[in-house]
């Protein structure tokens, strides 16, 4: 087994109490978690919103390149962003971006060693959810006023 | 694979699993740098992203000419270039971790990471070139 073909192999090799090698099953299984509890739900949401934000990065790139390319290319991107699908996409990306930003700050606090106890984790988790709703609403309020 | 009959590895002073020691693969020495850069870019992106979102939200009605004026402003152009570089760095390394966690076939994993890095480089260069064409 010089070259590992599948990274899961690392979790499939264990030892019996007498020291002999044994293939043991992958653990822990996702099914043992209650995915609706705040901690794990926000954890996977942080990852998902990070991936959703890629759509916003693609739109930003299209917007910048179109602005440099000329009026007709810029008109196309403005038309898309003003369409039903474009507004739906922008709203989704705005909410995902604010969630990922606020949850990211929570992660940075954890990395600094703050807020790891369960009561604080739930408090900051609720703050992230409420903050996401408030900041998404404020962003679109500002957008609609200036439009 | 050799192993002792007692079940305990002969030496376990280093923070390395018995499996890793037997395979002799060791650390590639880049894991903590990747982790640290993910944090550094996220801290830098906090003010940059909020500035960009607020600028776009409050300037939603801008015409093409006004957008060119806004991007062409040296202050905005510099911040945009920083935003582009850090965004694509953070995106590529974040997607890399997602791929490493969920793609288990080695060739597919490395291939997918290389595609993500290649696309991020190209899109980042295109976005930066667009800003430079307008600003310079």
Image (cartoon, coloured by chain):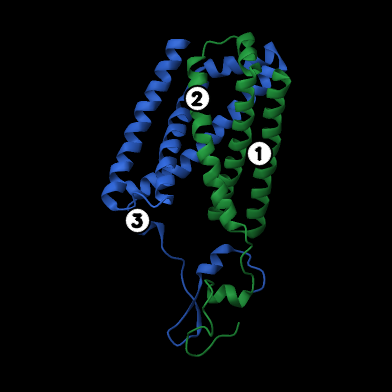
Q: Nearer the viewer, mark 3 or mark 1?
A: 1
Residue at mark 3: chain: A
Kindly check if marks 3 and 1 are in contact, taking CB atoms under 8 A apart as contact: no
Q: Is residue B95 visible to the viewer in this orientation of the structure?
A: yes
| B92 shown above or below B123 | below
Q: In this rendered view, identify the residue nearer to me: A111 or B93.
A: A111
Q: Secondary structure at mark 1?
A: helix
Q: What's the colour of chain A in the image?
A: blue
Q: Secondary structure at mark 3?
A: loop
Q: Position of residue A73 (x, y in %)?
A: 68, 16
Quadrant containing the N terminus of chain B is bottom right
Q: Nearer the viewer, mark 2 or mark 3?
A: 2
Q: Is residue B51 left or right of residue B81?
A: left
Q: Position of residue B76 (x, y in %)?
A: 60, 21
Q: In this rendered view, identify the residue nearer to me: A61 or A106.
A: A106
Location of mark 3 (residue): A33
Q: Which chain is green?
A: B
Q: Residue at x 69, y 39 (%)?
A: B121
Q: In this rendered view, identify the residue nearer to me: B27 or B92.
A: B27
Q: Is residue B8 left or right of residue A109?
A: right
Q: Examine the image and state in which quarter residue B119 appears.
A: top right
Q: Could you classify mark 2 by the number of other residues whose Cα lies within 10 Å: few (under 14), some (14-19), or many (20 or more)?
A: some
Q: Could you classify mark 3 by the number of other residues whose Cα lies within 10 Å: few (under 14), some (14-19), or many (20 or more)?
A: few
Q: Residue at x 55, y 32 (%)?
A: A55
Q: Examine the image and state in which quarter residue B130 appears.
A: top right
Instruction: Answer yes or no: are tags 2 and 3 on the same subunit.
Output: no
Location of mark 2 (residue): B53
Q: Earlier in the sequence, mark 1 or mark 2?
A: 2
Q: Position of residue A124 (x, y in %)?
A: 32, 42
Q: How far apart in space, not on screen, are marks 2 and 3 (Cα)?
A: 36 Å
Q: Residue at x 71, y 36 (%)?
A: B122
Location of mark 1 (residue): B120
């Amino acid at each position: 087994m010089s070259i590992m073909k599948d990274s899961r192999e690392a979790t499939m090799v264990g030892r019996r109490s007498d020291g002999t090698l044994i293939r043991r099953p992958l653990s822990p299984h996702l099914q043992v978690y209650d995915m609706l509890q705040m901690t794990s739900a926000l954890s996977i949401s942080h990852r998902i919103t990070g991936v959703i934000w890629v759509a916003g990065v693609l739109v930003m790139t299209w917007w910048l390149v179109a602005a440099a390319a000329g009026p007709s290319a810029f008109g196309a991107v403005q038309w898309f962003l003003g369409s039903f699908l474009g507004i739906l996409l922008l709203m989704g990306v705005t909410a995902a971006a604010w969630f990922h930003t606020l949850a990211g700050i929570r992660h940075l606090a954890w990395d600094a060693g703050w807020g790891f106890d369960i009561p604080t984790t739930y408090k900051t988790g609720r703050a992230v959810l409420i903050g996401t709703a408030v900041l998404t609403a404020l962003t679109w309020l500002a957008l609609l006023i200036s439009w | 694979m050799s192993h002792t009959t007692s079940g305990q590895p002969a030496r376990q002073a280093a923070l390395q699993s018995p499996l890793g020691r037997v395979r002799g693969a060791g650390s590639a020495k880049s894991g903590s740098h990747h982790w640290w850069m993910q944090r550094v870019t996220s801290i830098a992106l906090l003010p940059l992203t909020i500035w960009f979102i607020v600028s776009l939200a409050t300037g939603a009605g801008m015409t093409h000419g006004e957008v060119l004026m806004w991007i062409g402003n040296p202050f905005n152009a510099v911040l945009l270039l920083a935003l582009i570089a850090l965004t694509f760095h953070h995106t590529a390394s974040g997607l890399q971790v997602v791929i490493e966690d969920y793609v288990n076939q080695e060739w597919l994993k490395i291939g997918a990471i290389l595609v993500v890095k290649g696309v991020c480089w190209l899109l980042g260069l295109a976005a930066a070139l667009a800003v430079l064409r307008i600003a310079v």
